[in-house]
Amino acid sequence: MLMTPSQDTKKLPVLVVLHQETSSPGRVGQMLVEKGYPLDIRRPVLGDPLPSTLAQHTGAVIFGGPMSANDPDPFVKAETDWIAVPLKENKPFLGICLGSQMMVRHLGGTVAADKDGMTEIGWYPLRATAHGRLLMPHWPKMVYHFHREGFSLPRGAQLLAEGDVYPNQAFRYGDNAWGVQFHAELTRAMMQRWVVRGEGRFIMPNAQKGSEHLEGRMIFDAPLKQWLSDFLSLVFERHAAEGQQAPERPMRRSA
């Protein structure tokens, strides 16, 4: 567990859940710290415990990873079950890629590969829905992906953005739970590492070559970065500004 400093020690930390020893919260972490939130970084896959309550946290973010939300590993089930905590306490929760898929599983939805084996590895179009545009007027037209599974839209969730191969790209559940399939958090150094380490996946159906990942960043990253800052303010700052919690929302649980 690692606590990072913040400019505003009055704000409660954001719980950050990562899935590899060398994983980083990237720009999400940088932007949260800039907004005044300390980071409480934990890696359950390495034995770090998750808190039984978020009373001492502003909210939580579960990041992506190379594993699947369908994997039988104990930590995958434990994290998926743990999502009951922010949902019950109505604390801000953000799932990114694997984290969003875990939330979908928790809510009774499904996580699966495209029937034709198509992947999204590289830059692909994003379209905000009417719900998404009401929440945020400006969405990026292209976003970065690195996945070969998508998710169904949980019952009761609002679809905020959609794509071509995997239609469900961003959603909101209740007042304070959010999931996104794509990666806005990558710094340039992180993307370069992913391109090197993930080279073997670039031959998969619909995947882009490594050079296209880095070239696309030069073209598409600026609006994605601005969107991320605005989105994190929507998720965490809006909740803090309201100064109170809404009534608890009934939860759907997977079998």
Image (cartoon, rainbow, N blue to C red):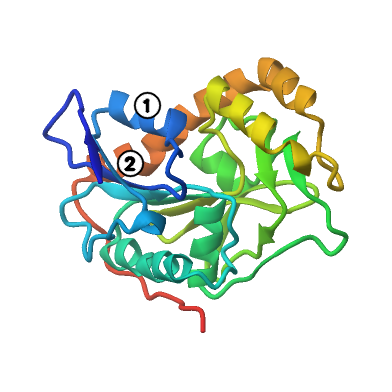
- Residue 132 pos. (x, y %): 57, 44
**Residue located 41% across and 57% down the image:** 45
**Residue located 27% across and 60% down the image:** 49
Q: Would residue 70 be found to the left or right of residue 32 on screen? A: right
Q: Is residue 255 above or below residue 220?
A: below
Query: Is residue 230 shown to the viewer in this render?
Result: no
- Residue 24 pos. (x, y %): 43, 35
Spatial distance from mark 2 to mark 1, Cα to Cα? 14 Å
* Disc on res. 30: 1
- Residue 189 pos. (x, y %): 54, 22
**Amino acid under disc 2:** Phe
**Amino acid under disc 1:** Gln
**Residue located 62% across and 64% down the image:** 153
Q: Would residue 242 be found to the left or right of residue 208 on screen? A: left
Residue that sits furthest to the left in the current view: 10
- Residue 240 pos. (x, y %): 24, 42
* Disc on res. 236: 2
